[in-house]
Image: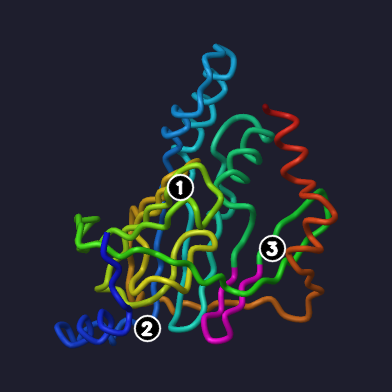
């Protein structure tokens, strides 16, 4: 599949539609589908039931992306309950977003804020450069024409390729979780092995000003430091539900 240089794509897109440059901020809501967990079933009736419970609960999830021209924040909508069970809520939410992701494209920085019990962890990392293959395949998501990009599984360590559908009409390099800084347009659909995120509402240049409250005066740790302590949240949730 042919790769296309961003050097040629971005100027072309700006030329054919000068209104792109007018987009300065936005609010995107994403729905989540975990029906692709069907592929992970191994025949155990109990495991199949658990997959179904998780997939059904995930349908109630809604995640929010706020962005301006250089920063974004991605997180679960606050106060949203997706089931009658707190533990199930926490587990499914963790599967779809480990916490709140703050992104600053200007300095290629990202901070993940996640919690374990009463402690907040601020995990700082650089935005990873990813070798996406941009294709000519396209589809409509809402009113936006989106193009398909593929991140080969050999580059991610996942068991399936990662697929993104991005909208050049919204020329900001943001998207769900930590998939930022690599594509010439906002990701409106992201297909991961465990879940698919699809934009359900797109509000550009909203009347209410978008304010990204970047974490201030916090103690951060690197990804390596965080991993060395063990991902306590994941360990507890995995142990409680699988």
Q: Quadrant of the C terminus?
A: top right
The rendered magenta stretch, by its main secondary structure, is classed as: strand
Observer-side mark, 1 or 3, equals 1
Query: Considering only vertical position in the picture, is 162 above or below 108?
Result: above
Where residue 135 sits, quadrant-wise, is bottom left
Q: Secondary structure at mark 1?
A: loop
Residue 117: say if magenta. Answer: no
Q: Is residue 178 left or right of residue 138?
A: right
- The residue where tag 3 is placed is 113
Query: Considering only vertical position in the picture, is 196 above or below 179?
Result: above
Q: Are marks 1 and 3 in contact (CB under 8 Å)?
A: no
Q: Which of pointers 2 and 3 lies earlier in the amino acid sequence?
A: 2
Q: Is residue 99 left or right of residue 138?
A: right
Q: Which mark is residue 192?
A: 1
Which residue ends up furthest to the top in the rendered image? 45
Query: Considering only vertical position in the picture, is 239 above or below 159?
Result: above
Q: Secondary structure at mark 3?
A: strand
Where residue 14 sits, quadrant-wise, is bottom left
Q: Is residue 148 left or right of residue 140?
A: right
Label 3 neighbour load within 10 Å: few <14, some 14-19, many 20+: some
Residue closest to the eye, 33 or 6: 6
Q: Which mark is residue 12?
A: none
Residue closest to the eye, 93 or 2: 2
- The residue where tag 2 is placed is 24
Residue 103: say if magenta. Answer: yes
Q: Position of residue 224 (x, y in %)?
A: 77, 63
Q: Residue at x 48, y 32 (%)?
A: 37
Region of the chain picked out in magenta, as a range: 102-111
Report the Cα–Cα distance between label 2 and label 3: 25 Å
Report the Cα–Cα distance between label 1 and label 3: 21 Å
């Amino acid at each position: 599949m042919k790769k296309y240089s961003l050097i040629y794509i971005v100027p072309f897109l700006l030329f054919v539609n000068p209104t792109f440059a007018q987009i300065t901020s936005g609010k995107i809501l994403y729905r989540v589908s975990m029906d692709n967990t069907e592929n992970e079933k191994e025949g155990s009736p109990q495991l199949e039931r658990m997959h179904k419970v998780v997939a059904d609960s995930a349908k109630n999830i809604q995640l929010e992306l706020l962005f301006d021209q250089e920063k974004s924040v991605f997180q679960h909508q606050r106060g949203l309950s997706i089931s009658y069970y707190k533990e199930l809520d926490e587990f499914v939410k963790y599967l779809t977003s480990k916490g709140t992701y703050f992104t600053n494209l200007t300095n290629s920085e990202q901070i993940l804020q996640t919690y374990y019990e009463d402690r907040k962890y601020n995990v700082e990392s650089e935005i990873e450069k990813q070798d996406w293959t941009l294709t000519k395949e396209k589809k409509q998501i809402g009113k936006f024409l989106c193009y398909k990009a593929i991140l080969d599984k050999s580059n991610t360590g996942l068991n399936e390729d990662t697929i993104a559908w991005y909208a050049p009409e919204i020329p900001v390099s943001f998207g769900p979780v930590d998939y930022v800084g690599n594509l010439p347009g906002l990701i409106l659909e992201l297909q991961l092995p465990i879940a698919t995120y699809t934009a359900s509402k797109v509000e550009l240049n909203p009347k209410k000003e978008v304010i990204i409250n970047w974490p201030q005066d916090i103690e951060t740790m690197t990804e390596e430091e965080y991993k060395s302590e063990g991902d306590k949240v994941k360990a507890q949730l995995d142990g409680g539900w699988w």
